[in-house]
Every structure is written in C-alpha cells, then in structure tokens.
Amino acid sequence: MDTTAPGSVESDNIYVVDTSAIMSRRIDMLNRKLVFPASVLEEIRKGKLRRLLDVVSPEINVYAPSKESRRDVVSFATRSGDITVLSDTDIDVIALALELKATIITDDYAIENVAEFMGIHYVGSDLKPIKSKIKWSFRCTGCGKFYKSDIGTCRICGHALKRVPVRKTGKK
C-alpha cells in the first residue's frame, strides 16, 4: 500500500480517484497526477458536488477503462466475494488503476479489498484503510450452508444468503 497522503501527492505515482475521495473534499482535484474514471464524474454530477465538478471538469484527466481490465476486476472480485457489493463505478476505478499501474484513492473497503487481492496500491482519503485482505463467502441464514458465490437463496432450505468473511489473509 502507498503511504503518500492523497492531499499532498509528492511521488511520481498516478492516482485514480474514487467518488468517496471526492466527497471527502480532502484532495486537490486540479492536481495533474489525479485521474478520474468517467463513471465517477457521472456519480458526482448526480449529487451536491456537481457545481464543483462544473468548475474543474475542463482541467482534469478523465478516462474510461478497457473491457478487458473490467473483466479482470470482475474475475478477482468474484473470487474474493466482493462482486456483490461493487458498483460498476467501483469496477471502473479498480480497472483503470490496473491499466495505468496507478494508486487508488478511496474510502471504500470493498475496493480496497479487491485492490489488495490484485496487488494494486491504494490510500484512504479520509478513513483508515483495511488492515487485511478478506475472503468472503455466502452463508444461508436458515440452515447455515456455505456457498462460494451469491446464488440468492439456499438450494437446501430456500432462505436468503448473507455475505460473511471466511478468512482474513493476515496483516498487509
């Protein structure tokens, strides 16, 4: 994990910015080392910070990840068990960081967990980052049977499945 504070990007790294980082208002959006997925900006345009975005939009770096990078992220997120909580925008953030070999600025723990599994660096914008990788599974709320993926309801008793941590893979 990169330990450079996001507000004072001093290294030669490129940083991919998640929506949570913009909402923290702790980053300098005009910093040329910051890259914004187009989908993140669409999320911001729907919220209260849209006026800020209107001011800085012409000056910031906006990119969209390739379909191949998105597929790689979906594959890793499926294996880690995070796929059910990642939005399309979250997948774009991770995929763009993968393509650009960049560091992610986010406070989203699911993004951090998938990034950790993929070997992508990240920093928090406001919250403490995760301390260890988590492998998720899905447990039936009725009979307790475990499933590797979220199939919706238990094949045995028909109860809903709940996402639960199966294994923490140690300190980072």
Image: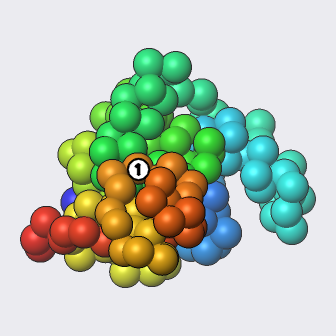
Q: Position of residue 77 (x, y in %)?
A: 39, 46
User: Residue, x 63% and y 58% (percent of image)?
Assistant: 19
Q: Position of residue 124 (x, y in %)?
A: 41, 69
User: Residue, x 51% and y 20% (percent of image)?
Assistant: 66
User: Residue, x 81% and y 59% (percent of image)?
Assistant: 52
- Assess disc 1: are there few (<14), some (14-19) or many (≥20) residues with their C-alpha within 10 Å of its C-alpha: some
Q: Position of residue 145 (x, y in %)?
A: 34, 66
Q: How is the image coloured?
A: rainbow
Give amino acid for label 1.
Ser
Q: Quadrant of residue 37?
A: top right
User: Residue, x 12% and y 73% (percent of image)?
Assistant: 171
Q: Residue furthest front?
A: 156
Q: Is residue 105 left or right of residue 49?
A: left
Q: Quadrant of the C terminus?
A: bottom left
The residue carrying mark 1 is: 149
Q: Is residue 18 visible?
A: no
Q: Is residue 37 above or below residue 130?
A: above
Q: Quadrant of the N terminus?
A: bottom left
All told, the count of numbered labels is 1
Q: Is residue 104 above or below residue 99?
A: below
